[in-house]
Amino acid sequence: MDFKVLFAIAKTHIFTRIKQSAIAALGVTFGIATFIILVSFMTGLNGLLDGMILNRTPHIHLYNEIVPSKKQPVNLWEKTSKQWSVVSSVKPKQKQSRIYNALPLIEALKKSDDVYGLTAQVSTQAFYTAGTIELNGLINGVNIMQEAKLFNIDDYIIEGEIKDLHQNDNGIIVGAGVAKKMSAKIGDRIQLVSARGGQLSLKIVAIYQSGLAEIDNVQSYANIKTVQQLMGESSNYITDINIKLHDMDKAFPLAKAYERIYNVTAVDIHTANAQFDTGTTIRNIITYAVSITLLIVAGFGIYNILNMFIYEKMNDIAILKATGFSGNDVMFIFISQALILGLVGGVLGLLFGYSASVLIDNIPFVTEALPTVKTYPVNFDSSYYLIGMGFAIVSTFFAGYLPAKKAKSIDPVEILRGQ
């Protein structure tokens, strides 16, 4: 088997039917290009949505949930311990929302090999007042630099800088909705009134916009000491602990362990965002299903064209076999044609797909809901290009294999006799 000669024959077949060959290659080109564009854009969009939700969500959230006691006094009475008792109108236990022994708990968690980082937080309901305007709000007392490191809050600052809050105990970062409703800007002062009656006058040092209106309309950030002062509490008063892990997949079992060991309520990221995770999974399934369908359609195009090649080249096949070429030689010729078309079409598809993705990535995308996003999101993951090229080669190989197998079994005597 002289591969050089066989390859030359395959190349000759392609150029003698250049229009059909071009159509077959373009089928692969558009299939691969559409696959690259679609999967890059959709995964880029999913990445943007994941960033909006998951990047700001702790892997484990610890807090002290106020719930009715599971053990009622009647269950502790010896005479009724073995009886079925019904207690109606059960009220929650009288306890604060603080986490007990929060500071020792934080130190213990910091020593864990599974914990990448954590932030302590004091959250409370409060009223924003400025002149005659009064709004309900939620104030989060945090270590703002640690919050930026773990949860990327600085990515959503549209005016000012987070370091201004770090350097000012009388500062506050307000949501864009709060600032708009109160006609407030950086440098203005607003009054905070807690549910316990505490009051503070704070200076707006920055404005953030998360893209979620229900958050931006109520939530603000201040230093943890400031919120403790607003509530009239000491420095060991902590309501929430937000944890980032090295491995997010360990969030569920670790949350259950922390809940049992430290007697707190622990919510893992998968439980907190179950609906969002489901939506992301469905979008990914649809994206890959459509993309693979496009590639399969391109493969059928190659198959149909090579099938026609065989019928048109019956005489050539007969002559090749009559002059000493084996069935395997003929099979190699047609498979080579398919692979050449697949390779050329695949490379062009990658170039077109990449060019279109770059174009989309530079199209302005301006919306008030996402102030930090300037262009459409595109994911340039190299694995998509490898998948596209690999599928082009594999699909065209199988598209050429079946016609080539048919060409291998052709009897040259019958064809020449018919001539």
Image (cartoon, grey):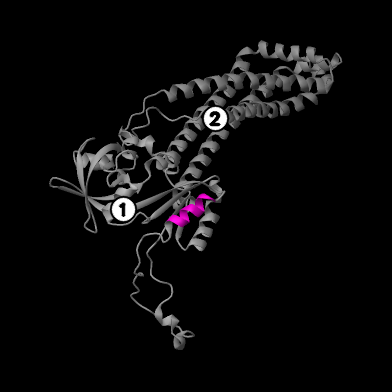
Identify the image quadrant of residue 301.
top right
| Residue 89 % position (x, y) | 33, 75
Left or right: where 199 falls relative to 124 = left
Residue 228, which numbered label?
1
Look at discs 1 and 2 and give the one toward the viewer. Answer: 1
Q: Report the front residue among 168 and 267.
A: 168
Mark 2 packing: few (<14 Cα in 10 Å), some, or many (20+)?
A: few
Amino acid type, callout 1 = Gln
| Total marks in image | 2
Amino acid type, callout 2 = Asp
Distance between mark 1 and mark 2 Cα atoms: 45 Å
What is the magenta range?
Answer: 103-111
Q: Earlier in the sequence, mark 1 or mark 2?
A: 1
Residue of label 2: 381
Q: Is the N terminus in the top left, top right, bottom left or bottom right quadrant?
A: top right
| Residue 270 % position (x, y) | 49, 51
